[in-house]
Amino acid sequence: MTWRRRFEALIDELSHTPGIVVREATLGPPTAPDVLARAQAVAGAAWPAGMTEFYAEIGSVDLEYGVHGATNGGAIHIPRVTDVWDHAAHEDELWFDWLVEENPDHPFTRIRPIDRFVAEAYAVLYPVPSDGPATAPATVHYHYCGEELIPTGLSYTAWLELLLRARGALYWLKLAVGKPTHTSWVEENIALIAARFPSFDPASMSPQVRKQEIRLD
């Protein structure tokens, strides 16, 4: 099944699940080959396997749903491929000019958002070069904007697979960095959604050893 069919199936599943209200569900048209080629040229070796196949079928994803309340539910906001790789577009969002003046290779300048699921936290690709060619594909990290950057150990394709399995439950990506040390509304929300979809299985998504944060200074 293609990525587009799988996301369409997710939207259909959510729309027909009791207790879930889909507030937004839009899949952008496929990305033109020349646009994909230009984005890949910008990314160089940082371009991850699987990104070409995804964007060739889906130009963007905007999905939000609620489960018995405004704070419970899920969200997926996958930007257009040109927005992922446009470094300048992320100024004042992910990096700031004063940071670059102090440290041109600051980690903030080397992350690219692949799912802006909420305003303050993203799934991102890291690292990408701030200057010079990349040497390896970027991998998926969890980024709480301005505060945390944590590797998940997931490739781009593995991240997409888990994103679908988790149905975009808010902050589900935190599972991939390690088991939670305390219960919060995030874990409660994840459990609420997992109870409706047994294939989610949050317990299977966390590594045995918690991932180490990347220093942001």
Image (tube, grey):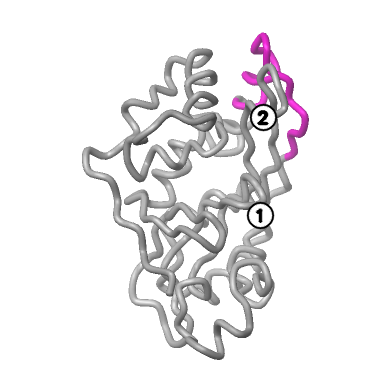
Foreground of the two, 138 or 189 = 189
Mark 1 lies on residue: 79
Q: Position of 166 compared to 4: left or right? A: left
Mark 2 lies on residue: 71
Q: Quadrant of the C terminus?
A: bottom left
Single out the residue that lies furthest toward the right.
23
Q: Residue at x 66, y 77 (%)?
A: 88
Mark 2 residue type:
Thr
Q: Residue at x 62, y 60 (%)?
A: 81
Label ID, residue 162: none
Residue 216 position by quadrant: bottom left
**Measured from the top left, where is residue 212 in percent x and y?**
30, 56
Looking at the image, can residue 159 be seen? Answer: yes
**Secondary structure type for disc 1:** loop
Q: Position of 145 compared to 24: left or right? A: left
Mark 1 residue type:
Pro
**Measured from the top left, where is residue 106 in percent x and y?**
46, 78
**Secondary structure type for disc 2:** loop
Residue 115, above or below 110: above
Q: Are marks 1 and 2 in contact (CB under 8 Å)?
A: no
Foreground of the two, 205 or 82 = 205
Residue 153, above or below 36: above
- Report, in whole angstroms, how far the alpha carbon at label 1 lies from the one at label 2: 23 Å
Q: Which residues are magenta?
A: 10-26
Q: Is residue 177 magenta?
A: no
Q: Residue at x 65, y 30 (%)?
A: 8
Residue 168 position by quadrant: top right
Q: Position of 151 compared to 19: left or right? A: left
**Measured from the top left, where is residue 152 in percent x and y?**
36, 50
